[in-house]
Image (spheres, rainbow, N blue to C red):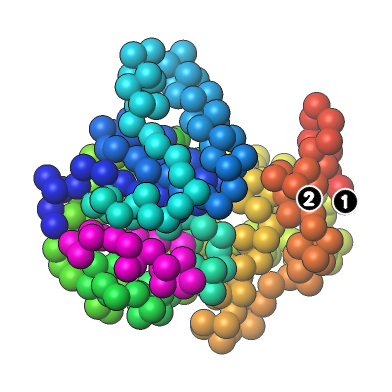
């Protein structure tokens, strides 16, 4: 399959990442089929996409007519069967290996033989995920950054069985989406999260050991390292459960104690304080302005 053959894109998962991928895919001219088991999530995703497109239009990046056309390309469904005619299917479910594998086992028999299957995993082995599918040669990682409409990078990861034509088609598709690709070998957490998440984990250790408060740690990194967002604020934005999942993949996959998840990160996740999406993490989001929780 080549980029000329890719007309329709299926997306499994209508959360923050899935809706973002649907957004940029529809703007780029692809027909989009977004699937989620939760109809309310699908409705929320479509409303979010429309709101974000309107924000782009207000900045002159797209026109009002572009919004109507792009939204018209998006179809929602609760059934995986709706992906049967898609040329590329991108899984954007939660960062849990068994959940992803279960999805792949179910969707592969429904896809047309020449279709490409991708995972938006941010850390899990592409080779291991591909092994449960019926098309390991047509399987690879396509890791978008959050928020998808704004962030420029997509990490492309080949498994041991990924065919060259598959990689080239997805690379070309990435560029058609207006993104820049970076190729990563199939090692735990790839490039971005291999570097970023240990820094976030170390920031949590700095909080855990009383070296600084939430506010002082984030202020220090914003003003001292010129980061646009402090590491604890960023962790809340990513989701502390996702941060913990990635650190666990690094710790298990590389067997190095420097990747051990901070006990405070574990405690927050166990409490259900997983960041902005839950209303509380290292900051409390219950008011008009986020307030540090420690």
- How far across and how far down the image is residue 169, in percent? 18, 55
- Magenta residues span 101-121
Number of marks drawn: 2
Relative to 23, does residue 196 appear above or below in the rendering?
below
In the image: residue 90, left or right of residue 232: left
Residue to which mark 2 is pinned: 282
- The crowding category of the residue bearing disc 1, from other C-alpha atoms within 10 Å (few below 14, some 14 to 19, many at least 20), is some
- How far across and how far down the image is residue 72, in percent? 36, 26
In the image: residue 289, left or right of residue 82: right
Magenta highlight on residue 110:
yes
Question: On the image, which quarter does residue 157 sit in?
Answer: bottom left
Q: CA distance from mark 2 to mark 1?
A: 7 Å
Q: Residue at x 33, y 31 (%)?
A: 73
Query: Which of the pair 155/221 is nearer the observer?
Result: 155
- Mark closest to the chain's N terminus, 2 or 1: 2
Q: Residue at x 53, y 24 (%)?
A: 51
- The crowding category of the residue bearing disc 2, from other C-alpha atoms within 10 Å (few below 14, some 14 to 19, many at least 20), is many
Determine whether the residue tagged by mark 2 lies in a helix, strand or loop: loop
Pointer 2 with pointer 1, Cβ within 8 A: yes
Q: Residue at x 20, y 65 (%)?
A: 113
Relative to 202, does residue 8 appear above or below in the rendering?
above
Quarter of the image with the N terminus is: bottom left
In the image: residue 117, left or right of residue 194: left
Residue 294 numbered tag: 1
- How far across and how far down the image is residue 65, in percent? 34, 14
- How far across and how far down the image is residue 129, in percent? 41, 74
């Amino acid at each position: 399959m080549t980029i000329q053959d890719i007309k329709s894109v299926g997306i499994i998962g209508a959360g923050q990442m899935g809706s973002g991928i649907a957004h940029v895919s529809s703007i780029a001219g692809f027909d989009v089929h977004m699937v989620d088991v939760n109809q309310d999530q699908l409705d929320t995703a479509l409303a979010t996409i429309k709101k974000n497109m309107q924000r782009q239009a207000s900045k002159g990046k797209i026109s009002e007519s572009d919004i109507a056309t792009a939204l018209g390309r998006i179809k929602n469904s609760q059934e995986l069967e709706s992906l049967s005619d898609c040329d590329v299917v991108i899984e954007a479910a939660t960062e849990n290996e068994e959940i992803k594998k279960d999805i792949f086992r179910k969707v592969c028999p429904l896809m047309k033989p020449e279709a490409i299957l991708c995972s938006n995993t941010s850390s899990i082995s592409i080779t291991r995920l591909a092994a449960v599918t019926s098309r390991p040669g047509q399987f690879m990682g396509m890791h978008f950054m959050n928020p998808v409409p704004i962030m420029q990078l997509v990490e492309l990861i080949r498994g041991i069985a990924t065919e060259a034509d598959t990689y080239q088609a997805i690379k070309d598709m990435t560029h058609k989406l207006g993104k820049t690709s970076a190729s990563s070998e199939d090692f735990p957490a790839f490039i971005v999260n291999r570097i970023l998440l240990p820094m976030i984990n170390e920031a949590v250790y700095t909080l855990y050991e009383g070296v600084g408060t939430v506010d002082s740690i984030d202020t220090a990194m914003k003003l001292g390292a010129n980061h646009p967002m402090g590491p604890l604020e960023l962790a809340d934005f990513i989701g502390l459960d996702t941060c913990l999942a990635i650190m666990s993949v690094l710790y298990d996959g590389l067997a190095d104690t420097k990747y051990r998840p901070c006990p405070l990160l574990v405690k927050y996740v166990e409490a259900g304080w997983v960041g902005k999406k839950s209303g509380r993490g290292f900051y409390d989001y219950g008011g008009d302005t986020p307030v540090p929780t420690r």
